[in-house]
Image (spheres, rainbow, N blue to C red):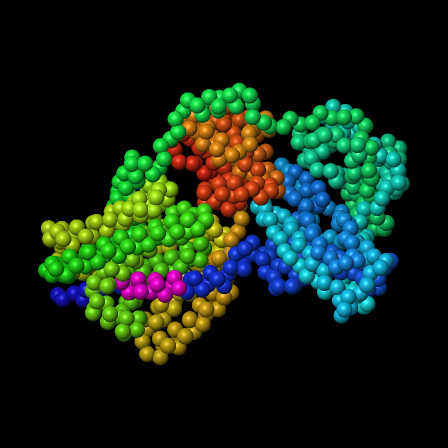
Amino acid sequence: MIYRLPSFRPLAAAAWVLALALLTLVTAQNSFAQIQLLGNSQTAGSAVVTTPRVRAELVAHAPDGVTPGQPLWLGLRITHQPEWHTYWKNAGDSGLPTQLQWQLPAGLEAGEIDWPLPEAIRVGPLVNYGYEGELLLPVPFKVAADFKAPAGDTLTVRLHASWLVCRVECIPEEGDFTLQLPVRSASAMHAPAFAAAQAGRPAALQGQSTAKVEGERLQLRIAGLPAALQGQNLRLFPETPEVLEHAAVWTQAWDGAVWTADWPLSAMRGETPNELPFVLAPATAPTSGPLAWRTVAAVEGRWSSAPVAGVSPALAAALAANAQQVPPAPPASGASGFWMALLGGLVGGLILNLMPCVFPVLAIKIVGFARHGQDRRALRIGGLAYGAGVLLSFLALGGLLLALRAAGQQLGWGFQLQSPGLVAAMAVLFTLLGLNLAGMFEFGRMLPQRWASAQVRHPVGEAFLSGVLAVAIASPCTAPFMGASLGLAIDMPAAQALTVFAALGVGMALPYVLASFLPALVRWLPRPGAWMETFRHAMAFPMFATVAWLVWVLGQQSGIDGAGALLVLLVALSALVWALTLGGRTRWLLGAGLLLATLWLGSAVGPHITRAVAAESAATAGASATEWQPWSAERVSSLTAAGTPVFVDFTAAWCVTCQVNKHTTLNRDDVRADFAARGVALLRADWTRRDPAITQALTALGRSGVPVYVLYAPGRPPHVMTELLSPAEVHGALQAL
C-alpha cells in the first residue's frame, strides 16, 4: 500500500504569516489606543465624554443669557450604566466625590456644586452615598457687574472633571469638556434637568440642631422639621466624612417636634469639629414641598481621636540593629547569580520543548526525519538553521525587553502577553496551526504559489523560520520555569543578560539539533506510514488546548466580553478557512461571504478584546489599624533581609473591594491571630492618591490597579494572592511559610 504522506512544511509557512499578523496587530493596536485608556471616547473640544460605564456632558442653563444679576448655571450631567454609581460629597465607607475644575473667561465666578440628595448604596458590609441612573451636578455662577461680552458673543467654558465610578470594582475616570455658551441668547435646552435638580436640593432648616458626644456615640437633636414629618422615619446623611459609622445600627425617635438620633462614631474619626452639617430626608419622597432638609448642628463635647498607625520604637530599634548586623545580599549580577541564571536558562529551554504549545512543533519536525533520514547533510544544515532561528529570536526578544526597560518602561519578561491584542493574535495563530495539523487545510494550497514554492526552493530558510515560529509560540510558556532566571537577567548588565537569553535559546534548540546530527536517534523512528498522519492529527489537540488557555488569559485582561468576542472571531475564522478549502465557485462565493462576515464581526466585537477592565476579584488585607505600618520598598527589603515575612496590602480608600476584604477577611480575629503567630509584618500601601513608588511596585507585580495582596517570604518569590480573598486562602499561604 502506498501512503500519501502529509507535508511537514506548514510550520515555516505559518512563520511567514506570523510576520504579517504582527504587522496587522500593530496597526490595530494604534486604532484601539483611545479605547484602551479607561475606555474613554471623546472628540477634541467636545462637551460630551463617553466611557463604557458613564456618559458625561457639560450643560448650561441661562434663560436670560449671560447677564449680570441674572441666573447662570452650568452642570455636569452623568448618565450611569446599570449597576454603576458615582459618589456624593461624603462618599461613605469608600469612594471619592466627583471633582470639577473650571477654566473660565474673565467676569465669571463658579460656586460650589449644589449637591442633589444622594442614596445610600450598600456594598457587602459597607454603606456608601452616591447616585445611580441619571444625575445632574449643578453649579451656580456669578456674572461680574462689569462683565463685557467677547467678540462673537460666545463664551468658551472649559471643565476638567474627575469621578470614581463603581459597581463591585472601582474605576477612576476623568474628562475634559468644552462648551460654547451664547452670551445674548437664551440657553434653556436642559431646563427640565436643572429644574429637577433644584427641586431635589435640600432646603435650609431654620430650627436649632445639636450633636452631643456621649462616649463612642453621637446623639443628635434636630428641631424645626415640618409637622407633616413628625412620627416618620427619616434618612440621615452626614456631610463630613469619617465621623459616623455609616453601616452601623442606629436608632431614631421623636421627642415631640424634635427628631433625635443615636449613632456610633467612626473608628477613623479625626479631631472634633465645632459644627457638623447633615441632610435629612423622609423614607418616602413627599408629593409636595422639599425632598430633603439641611441643618448644621453645633457639637457639644469632644471625642477622642482614633489612633494613628506609626512605627513603634521597638520596631525602629530592631530595624536599625538588623541594618548594622546583616550584610547586604550579593547583587544578582554577581558571578554566582550569573551562573545560576545561565544554568536555569539552559534547563528551562530544554523543558520548554515538553510544553503543550511547543512539543507539537518539535515532534513534527523530528518526525519529518522519517522521510528524509538518508539525506544527512540536509538534516544537519536544517538543524543548524532551526537552532539559529530559535537563538536569534530569543536574543531579539531579550534585547527588546532590555531596551524598553532602559527607556524607562517598567516591564518584565512576559511583557508581550500583557497586551490583549497580542494575546488574541497568538490565539488566532494557534487556531490556524491546530486546524492545519488536524488536516482541515494545507498552507501550501492557500498561500500564493510564489510563497508556497519558496518552501521547496529554500529549505534552510524554512528551517530558520520554523525556529522563529517555535519561539513565538513558546514565549507564553516560559514564565512558569524561567521567572527566576529571567528576573535575575533583567537586572544584569546587558551582555550578561543577553547571554542568559542565549542559554534559553540553546536549551530549546538543543534536542532538535542533536537529533539532526545523531543518526541513531533517527533510526528509532518507525518507517513512514499512516501513523504519521495520525500523529499529526493528534498534535492538533495541544494547540487547541493552548488556544483555550489564551482565551482564559484574555478573559483576565478584557473580561468575559473580551473572551467571548475572541471565541466568536475564532469560530468565524475557522469557518472562513474551511470555505477556502472548497473548490470551484463555492469556494469564492462562500469564502467572500464568510470573509465579509468575519470583518463585520471584527469591527463589532473586536474592541471588546482590547478594552481593559478592572479586576473583579480581590485579595487579603486586615487587622486593626495599629497593627499595620506604612509601606515602602525599602522597608520590605529590610524586613525580608532580617528573616521576617511581610504581607503587603495595596489598597485605596475609593476601592470598594478593598474595603469589603478588610471587613470580611483581614479584620477577622483568626486571620489576625495567624499573622501574629507566624511573626508576619503587616504593611499597607495606600494608593488613594497617585504615588509613583506604589505605581512602580504594582507594575513590578504585573498589576495596574488595586486591590493587590502580596506575601513576601525570605528566600522565596512574592506570593500574589487572589483579589477576592477568603480566610482559607490566607491561612493556606501562611501555612506554607
Magenta span: chief secondary structure = helix
Residue 336 can be seen in this image = yes
Tell me if residue 78 is in the magenta stretch. Answer: no
Which residue does the image show at 51% across and 34% down from the upper left?
Answer: 632
Q: Is residue 538 left or right of residue 274?
A: left
Viewer-proximal residue among 426 and 105: 105
- What range of the chain is rendered magenta? 12-23
Percent coordinates x, y for residue 227 in the rendering: 89, 41
Q: Is residue 687 left or right of residue 233?
A: left
Q: Is residue 458 above or below residue 286?
A: below
Q: Is residue 91 above or below residue 194?
A: above
Viewer-proximal residue among 93 and 157: 157
Which residue does the image show at 35% across and 32% down from the upper left?
Answer: 330
Which residue does the image show at 75% across and 30% down from the upper left?
Answer: 272
Image quarter in which the N terminus is found: bottom left
Asked which quadrant contains residue 102, the reply is bottom right
Percent coordinates x, y for residue 133 in the rendering: 68, 53
